Image: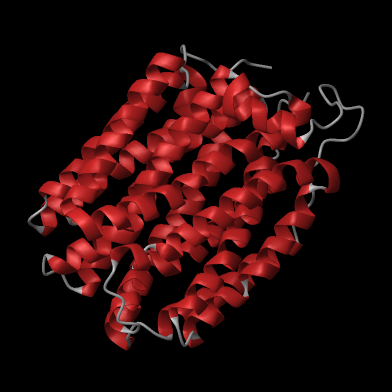
C-alpha cells in the first residue's frame, strides 16, 4: 500500500481541477442576468431551468462515470469530459434562444461529471485513508477557487463589455487549457492484483449501497443532496435578489464570487482536519452553518450583510464538501471506491435540479425571500437527519 504521496501528480490534477471549476464559474454571475436582459424571461422557474438541466445531466453521468472508471480507466474519461466541454462557451456566445442555453448546459453537465469525478478519483487512487481528506481538500479547493475567480472575472468583464461575448470568450480559453493539461496526465487506475483490488461491483449494487443498504453511504448521499440543493437555489436566485436590492453587476459578482471563494479556501483547512478529528462532526456543523448563511441572505438589506452571508454559507459548504467525499471513501471497498463516489455524486448533484426547480417555482408563487427561507429549512432538517443517522466516523490509517 502506498504511504508516500506522489505530490507532483497530485499537484498536476489540482491545477486541472481549477480549470474544471472555472467552466462553471463562467455561468455563475452572468447567465441568470442574461436570461432577463437578452431573452426577456421573467419566470424564475424558467430561468433556473438551465441549472436543473445541468444538475440532472451531471448527476446521471456521475453515476456511470464511477463504474466506467473501474473498467476503462480514469484518464480517458477525463479527456472525453474536456472534449465535450469545449463547445459550451462557444454556444453561450452565439445562442439565439434560451433553448440553446439549455442544450449548452447538458454538455456542461457531462463535462463537469467526467472531469471533476475523475480528478477526485485519481487523487484518491494516489492517497491512503490517512490522507483522503488532505488530497480531496486540495482538489475541491482548486475547483471552487477556479469557480470563484471566474465568477468574479466574468462579472467585471460583463460590466465593462456587456454580457456577451467577453465573459464566454474567457471560458473558451479555460476549456482549451484544461484539455491540454489533461492530455499530459497519467492514468491512476489500480492494477489487477494490487492489495485490496477485486472485481468491480455492478451498477445496481453500487446504487443500492449508496441509497439505502449502507447507512453511512446513504446518509452521506442525503447530506450531499441538501448541500447542492442549497447551491442550486443560490446559483439561480442570488444574482436576481442582489440586482433587485440595487447592487450593480460588479457588486453582484463580488458577492457571488465570495461564496465559492470561501467555500474553496476553507476546504484546505477542513479536509485535512477531518483526517485528524473525524468526519461526522464537521459534516453536521457545516450543514448547520449553510442553513444559517442562507437565512442571512433572506435578512439582507446591504452589501456588508450579503458579504457576511456569503462568508457563513461558504464556510459551511467548505466544511462538508471534501469531508463527505472522504467519508464515502472511508466506507467503500478499495475495488469499488470509484463506483461508491459516483453514486454519492449522483445524489449530491441531483440537488442542483431539486434546488433550481423547487426554489424557482417557490419564487414565482411566494417570492424570492420565501424560496430562500424554505431552502434554509431543508438544509437544517438534513443536518438533523445526518446527525441522527451516523455515528462519528474517523479515517482509518493504513
As rendered, which of 200 and 357 lies closer to the eye?
357
Q: Is residue 170 visible?
A: no
Q: Is residue 163 visible?
A: yes
Residue 51, x across and y down, in percent: 44, 60
Which residue lies most toward the right here?
193
The colour scheme applied to this rendered structure is secondary structure
Q: Is residue 226 above or below residue 181?
A: above
**Drawn side of residue 41 relative to residue 6, left or right:** left
- The quadrant of the picture occupied by the N terminus is top right
Q: Quadrant of residue 156?
A: bottom left
- The quadrant of the picture occupied by the C terminus is top right
As rendered, which of 242 and 125 lies closer to the eye?
242
Q: Quadrant of residue 291?
A: top left
Which residue lies most toward the top here?
391
Residue 181, x across and y down, in percent: 68, 63
Residue drawn at point x = 45 percent, y = 45 percent:
351
Q: Is residue 71 above or below residue 198?
A: below
Residue 161, x across and y down, in percent: 33, 87
**Drawn side of residue 105 relative to residue 246, left or right:** right
Residue 87, x across and y down, in percent: 61, 77
As rendered, which of 14 and 41 lies closer to the eye?
41
Residue drawn at point x = 18 percent, y = 53 percent:
366
Residue drawn at point x = 47 percent, y = 36 percent:
224
Q: Is residue 267 above or below residue 22?
A: above
Amino acid at each position: 500500500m502506498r504511504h508516500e504521496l506522489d505530490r507532483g501528480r497530485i499537484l498536476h490534477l489540482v491545477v486541472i481541477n481549477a480549470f474544471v471549476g472555472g467552466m462553471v464559474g463562467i455561468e455563475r454571475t452572468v447567465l441568470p442576468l442574461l436570461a432577463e436582459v437578452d431573452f426577456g424571461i421573467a419566470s424564475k422557474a424558467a430561468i433556473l431551468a438551465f441549472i436543473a438541466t445541468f444538475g440532472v445531466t451531471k448527476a446521471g453521468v456521475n453515476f456511470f462515470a464511477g463504474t466506467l472508471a473501474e473498467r476503462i480507466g480514469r484518464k480517458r474519461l477525463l479527456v472525453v469530459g474536456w472534449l465535450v466541454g469545449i463547445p459550451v462557451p462557444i454556444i453561450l456566445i452565439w445562442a439565439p434562444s434560451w433553448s440553446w442555453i439549455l442544450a449548452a448546459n447538458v454538455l456542461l453537465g457531462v463535462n463537469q461529471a467526467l472531469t471533476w469525478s475523475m480528478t477526485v478519483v485519481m487523487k484518491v487512487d494516489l492517497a491512503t485513508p490517512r490522507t483522503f481528506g488532505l488530497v480531496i481538500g486540495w482538489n475541491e479547493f482548486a475547483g471552487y477557487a477556479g469557480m470563484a475567480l471566474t465568477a468574479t472575472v466574468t462579472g467585471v468583464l460583463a460590466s465593462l463589455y456587456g454580457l456577451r461575448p467577453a465573459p464566454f470568450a474567457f471560458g473558451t480559453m479555460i476549456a482549451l487549457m484544461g484539455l491540454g493539461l489533461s492530455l499530459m496526465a497519467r492514468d491512476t487506475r489500480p492494477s489487477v492484483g494490487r492489495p485490496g483490488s477485486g472485481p468491480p461491483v455492478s451498477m445496481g449494487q453500487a446504487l443500492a449501497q449508496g441509497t439505502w443498504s449502507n447507512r453511512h453511504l446513504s446518509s452521506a448521499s442525503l447530506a450531499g443532496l441538501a448541500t447542492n440543493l442549497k447551491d442550486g437555489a443560490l446559483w439561480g436566485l442570488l444574482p436576481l435578489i442582489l440586482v433587485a436590492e440595487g447592487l450593480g453587476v460588479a457588486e453582484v459578482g463580488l458577492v457571488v464570487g465570495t461564496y465559492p471563494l470561501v467555500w474553496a479556501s476553507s476546504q484546505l483547512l477542513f479536509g485535512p482536519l477531518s483526517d485528524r478529528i473525524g468526519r461526522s462532526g464537521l459534516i453536521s456543523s457545516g450543514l448547520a452553518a449553510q442553513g444559517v448563511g442562507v437565512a442571512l441572505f433572506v435578512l439582507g438589506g446591504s452589501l456588508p450583510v450579503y458579504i457576511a452571508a456569503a462568508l457563513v454559507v461558504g464556510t459551511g459548504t467548505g466544511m462538508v464538501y471534501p469531508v463527505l467525499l472522504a467519508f464515502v471513501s472511508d466506507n467503500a471497498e478499495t475495488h469499488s471506491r470509484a463506483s461508491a463516489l459516483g453514486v454519492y455524486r449522483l445524489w449530491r448533484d441531483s440537488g442542483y435540479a431539486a434546488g433550481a426547480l423547487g426554489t424557482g417555482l417557490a419564487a414565482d408563487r411566494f417570492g424570492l425571500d420565501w424560496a430562500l427561507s424554505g431552502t434554509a429549512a431543508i438544509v437544517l432538517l438534513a443536518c438533523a437527519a445526518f446527525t441522527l443517522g451516523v455515528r462519528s466516523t474517523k479515517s482509518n490509517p493504513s
